[in-house]
Amino acid sequence: MDLFVAPDGRPRCGWAGTAPEFLAYHDNEWGYPVADDIRLFEKISLEGFQSGLSWRTILVKRENFRDAFDGFNFHVISGYDQRDVNRLLMNAGIIRHKGKIEAVINNARKAVELQAESGSLANFFWRYEPAPDECDAPQSASTSPASIALSKELKRRGWKFVGPTTMFAFMQAMGLINDHVPGCVIRSAAAEARRIRSGLKTRSE
């Protein structure tokens, strides 16, 4: 993908220049390793909502989603009932898709189980971090063997809206892979964060 020269005169991944909201997200979040269970659950939920839509559509509504879903605290969401589904379906600030809303609630219950089993969601998800030589050139693929394996395991456990493409986007965003293109000034910062992030055992870039 072509590079985008940002207003500061430094190059970024091309997609960072395609919408006003993307530059800050690209520079401060995308591709940095995440070990926080709430953030991991939030991202997997938002990726599910994105299915069939653009990421910009979701990103501009992210604060609305956070307000509607109790900050994506999956322990709280796991207790949602039909009244909450109805409440969410009335919320014009989010994507009012019944199947996706119910998937978040279902996945919250599965996340509680997974956290109890693995100690944390991070412990589970980071098992699927691929070795660098298992990754294609940055941003050249929409799935990978690791995302296919993660999707298969989550589906086996009863999670919903977790297809291989959705899981690949999740892995890109949460830093399980560093998919910033060569020449992007954030690529080296993301790589350094992967090396030093406390609590994460990542392979070298």
Image (spheres, rainbow, N blue to C red):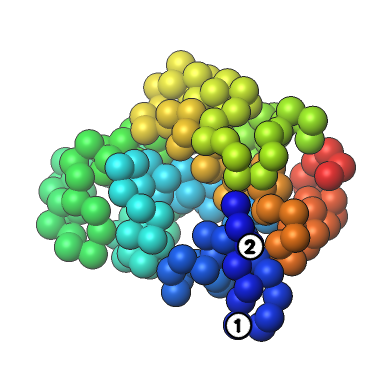
Instruction: Check disc 1 and give the amino acid type.
Output: Pro
Where is the C terminus found, in terms of image quarters?
top right
Other-residue count near label 2 (Cα within 10 Å), few / some / many at <14 / 14–19 / ≥20:
some
Q: Nearer the viewer, mark 1 or mark 2?
A: 2
Q: What secondary structure is found at the residue carrying circle 1? A: loop
Tell me the residue at 34%/41% (across/down).
51
In screen coordinates, is 122 left or right of 142? right
* Residue holding disc 2: 3
Can residue 146 be seen here?
Answer: yes
The answer to which quarter of the image holds residue 74 is top left
Counting from the top left corner in percent of width and height, residue 47 is at: 42, 45
Counting from the top left corner in percent of width and height, residue 191 is at: 79, 53
* Count of residue discs: 2
Above/below status of 180 relative to 61: above
Return the residue found at the far top.
156
In screen coordinates, is 35 left or right of 66? right
Tell me the residue at 84%/51% (across/down).
195
Tell me the residue at 46%/50% (across/down).
42
Instruction: Check disc 2 and give the amino acid type.
Output: Leu
* Residue holding disc 1: 7
Counting from the top left corner in percent of width and height, residue 90 is at: 13, 57
The answer to which quarter of the image holds residue 58 is bottom left
Tell me the residue at 66%/83% (across/down).
8
Mark on residue 132?
none
Q: What secondary structure is found at the residue carrying circle 2? A: strand
Can residue 34 be seen here?
Answer: no
In screen coordinates, is 103 left or right of 181? left
Q: Which sits in the foreground, 193 or 110? A: 193
